[in-house]
Image: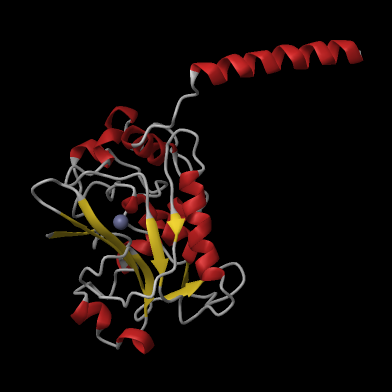
């Protein structure tokens, strides 16, 4: 079994965070043709394993900073944002489980959890999982290297070195917005990789430049409130999991409905 860790995802680099503040604010969609080119968005789909459009998960622990349940609700909203795209055929299902977490290993369940010192120990993030303390959240995908088939996908939120917030609870100065971060990690669940700008570790030439507005951009700030997907994110996930086109029979019914509607309208006027 091989483990692929999107560990570079969403690290806040202090030196560039201040400079980026102006760029990040208000950017939701790809603009100006600067960001990753449409012809290259297919590269955003990982080739390391066979991606999946479905996901069934259990939820272990919410954040130490949030007690009103809005952390879990934010995760569900982020899933809804991806799965409600007409361009892509994506599904998710929450299924509670009594399985114990196995941090850094497989346990037969897709786990989503905050990793706090209280629940897992103060060294859980760096020593047990082996992640940088500057990683905000991490998606770990386990797969069989011979077939590329996925075995397990877990999302871990860093609750030891990071603070968290939602619209209704949490740390409002310095806390990361749960829905914003979850939206990025869920992109990994459906097979998208991190995107960078020139000069950053992990950059490839097909990424172009000016990617700050992409959900799959690998860096963010605590004050970012963006919970929308960019055109590039949508095109990329649609290229991996295209949305279903209506069956011919359905099209005929739709056409009939349109005729009936028009008749009724003309009768009314
Ligand atoms: Zn990432």
Report which quarter residue 31 is drawn in. top left
Q: Is residue 140 above or below residue 91?
A: below
- Left or right of 113 in this view: 65: right
Residue at the far right in the pictured view: 269
Answer yes or no: is residue 19 visible: yes
What is the total number of numbered labels drawn onto the structure image? 0
Report which quarter residue 132 is drawn in. bottom left
Q: Nearer the viewer, residue 220 or 123?
A: 123
Answer yes or no: is residue 11 visible: no
At a point 36% along the width and 50% down the height, the residue shown is 187
Residue 37: give x, y in percent of width and height: 32, 31
Residue 199: give x, y in percent of width and height: 21, 50
Residue 43: give x, y in percent of width and height: 24, 37
Q: Is residue 64 above or below residue 131?
A: below
At a point 31% along the width and 85% down the height, the residue shown is 120
Which image quadrant: the C terminus?
Answer: top right
Q: Is residue 6 above or below residue 86?
A: below
- Left or right of 26 in this view: 259: right
At a point 20% along the width and 47% down the height, the residue shown is 203
Q: Nearer the viewer, residue 90 or 24?
A: 90
Which image quadrant: the N terminus?
Answer: bottom left
Report which quarter residue 50 is drawn in. top left
At a point 44% along the width and 42% down the height, the residue shown is 230
Residue at the far left in the pictured view: 146
Colour setup of the view: secondary structure
Q: Quadrant of ligand 1?
A: bottom left
Residue 164: give x, y in percent of width and height: 47, 73
């Amino acid at each position: 079994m091989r483990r692929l860790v999107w560990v570079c995802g969403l690290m806040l680099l202090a030196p560039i965070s201040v400079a980026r503040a102006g760029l990040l604010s208000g950017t939701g969609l790809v603009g100006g043709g600067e960001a990753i080119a449409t012809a290259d968005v297919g590269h955003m789909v990982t080739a390391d394993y066979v991606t999946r459009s479905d996901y069934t998960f259990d939820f272990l622990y919410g954040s130490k900073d949030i007690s009103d349940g809005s952390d879990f609700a934010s995760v569900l909203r982020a899933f809804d944002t991806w799965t409600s795209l007409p361009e892509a055929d994506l599904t998710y299902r929450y299924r509670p489980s009594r399985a114990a977490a196995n941090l850094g290993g497989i346990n037969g369940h897709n786990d989503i959890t905050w990793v706090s010192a209280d629940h897992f120990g103060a060294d859980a993030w760096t020593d047990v999982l082996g992640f940088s303390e500057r990683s905000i959240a991490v998606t770990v995908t386990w797969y069989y290297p011979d077939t590329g088939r996925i075995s397990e996908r877990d999302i871990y939120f860093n609750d030891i070195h990071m603070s968290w917030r939602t619209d209704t609870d949490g740390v409002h100065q310095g806390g990361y917005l749960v829905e914003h971060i979850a939206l990025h990690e869920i992109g990994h669940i459906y097979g998208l990789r991190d995107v960078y700008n020139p000069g950053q570790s992990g950059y490839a030439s097909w990424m172009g430049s000016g990617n700050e507005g992409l959900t799959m951009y690998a860096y963010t700030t605590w004050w970012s409130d963006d919970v929308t997907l960019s055109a590039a994110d949508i095109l990329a996930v649609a290229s991996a999991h295209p949305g279903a086109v209506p069956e011919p029979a359905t099209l005929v019914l739709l056409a009939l409905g349109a005729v009936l509607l028009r008749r009724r309208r003309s009768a009314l006027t």
